Image (cartoon, rainbow, N blue to C red):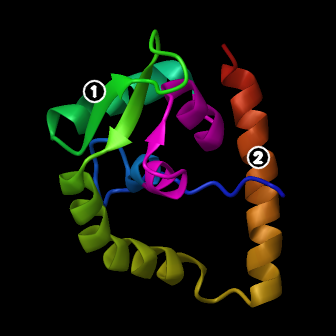
Amino acid sequence: MPRRFISPDSVYPRGGIAYWQTLKITGGEELPSQLAEHLGVTRATVTGLIDILERDSLVSRRPSPDDGRQKSVVLTEEGRNKLRDMAPEHFARLEAMVGLLSIEERGLFLDLLDRVTQGISSLTDE
């Protein structure tokens, strides 16, 4: 199944809602390297965003249950609540962006966007 890229947007300008959503989708806990892979961005980008979200008490870091030497990123209760509150506006904005496209065109658009995103990721691979 191809990745679906959700661009960070102005709903939460200090990091974008996509990073948060990925944590929720993946069960609320993830290694930074896994988040970077899911999002198609560098680990450095994710680290900066995690720092901001942690400062705002929306995520926290804790030892990984699989490898205590690594730190997992965990969505906090405050983060879950904020994400839930922001979701309707975020999805309304996404719908407004693609509202004129048919279902088939939306599928094509997402496939093309995924390919472009993969191309961008290849430029920033660490």
Disc 2 marks which amino acid? Val
Using the image, determine if residue 21 lies above or below residue 15. Answer: below
Instruction: Determine which residue is flagged by label 1.
Output: 51
Residue at horizontal 39%, vertical 50%?
20
Disc 1 marks which amino acid? Asp
Q: Residue furthest top?
A: 69
Residue at horizontal 59%, vertical 32%?
34
Relative to 58, 64 lies left or right: right
Q: The magenta stretch spans which residues?
A: 21-41
Mark 2 residue crowding within 10 angstroms, few (<14) / some (14–19) / many (20+) = few
Using the image, determine if residue 52 lies above or below residue 77. Answer: above
Q: Which quadrant is home to the N terminus? A: bottom right
Q: Which quadrant is home to the C terminus? A: top right
Instruction: Determine which residue is flagged by label 2.
Output: 116
Image location (x, y in percent) of residue 114: 76, 53
Disc nearer the start of the sequence (2/1): 1
Using the image, determine if residue 126 lies above or below residue 60. Answer: above
Residue at horizontal 57%, vertical 25%?
33
Secondary structure beneath disc 1? Answer: helix
Residue at horizontal 16%, vertical 41%?
57
Is 33 in the magenta?
A: yes
Secondary structure beneath disc 2? Answer: helix
Q: Which mark is residue 120?
A: none
Mark 1 residue crowding within 10 angstroms, few (<14) / some (14–19) / many (20+) = some
Image quarter of residue 42: top right
Image location (x, y in percent) of residue 76: 25, 47
